[in-house]
Image (tube, rainbow, N blue to C red):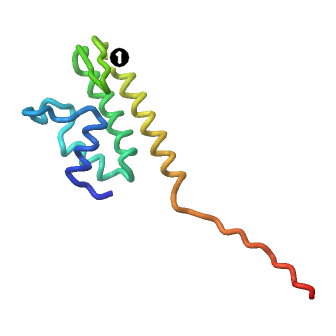
Amino acid sequence: MTITQGLVDEARKYLNEEIPEMGTVSETLFTDIMIIEVLSTSDTINQALYLLWTKKAGLVQKGSEVKQINAGGESVQKYTKMDYVKMCLETAKGYKELWEGEKGSGNSYSVALMKRRPRIW
């Protein structure tokens, strides 16, 4: 996988860790270097997101409770740390399933050979 700034930004988007407009990376849980390290050791973005969401679950345990989360037009008020950790791990599980599905859908193929019957004229 080729690591580009676009790929790092895409990973940030799917992690809900985008840098706020007029903000800095310090307002997120992950630096670009942290994301790049995981991307560089991953085969696909889904594998990287599985690993990053798992790491995020560990990182959010240190913080205080979440006051508000906005995702996809929905707003959730006052998550406990444990609720947020569970949500991160559930999201990681979803990306793990996507990654495992990718492993099984490679470009492999099998060829079946049939023995020909001699023609009788």
Mark 1 packing: few (<14 Cα in 10 Å), some, or many (20+)? few
Which one is nearer the viewer's eye here, 68 or 36? 68
> Where the C terminus falls, by quadrant?
bottom right
Residue at the spot of label 1: 82
The reply, left or right, for residue 14 in relation to residue 31 is: right
Quarter of image, res 25: top left
Q: Position of residue 92 (x, y in %)?
A: 40, 34
Q: Is residue 4 above or below residue 50?
A: below
Q: Is residue 39 above or below residue 53?
A: below
* Label 1 SS: helix
What residue do we see at 39% from left, 44% from top? 46
**Residue 115 coordinates in the image, percent (x, y):** 81, 76
Give the answer, above or below, for where 63 lies relative to 18.
above
Please report the residue visible at 88 percent of the width from the left and 84 percent of the height from the top: 119
Residue lying at the far bottom in this picture: please name it.
121
Q: Residue at x 29, y 58 (%)?
A: 2
Left or right position of 85 against 26: right
Report whether 118 appears left or right of 30: right
Labels in figure, total: 1
From the top left corner, tell me how far across and down residue 116 is, in percent: 82, 78
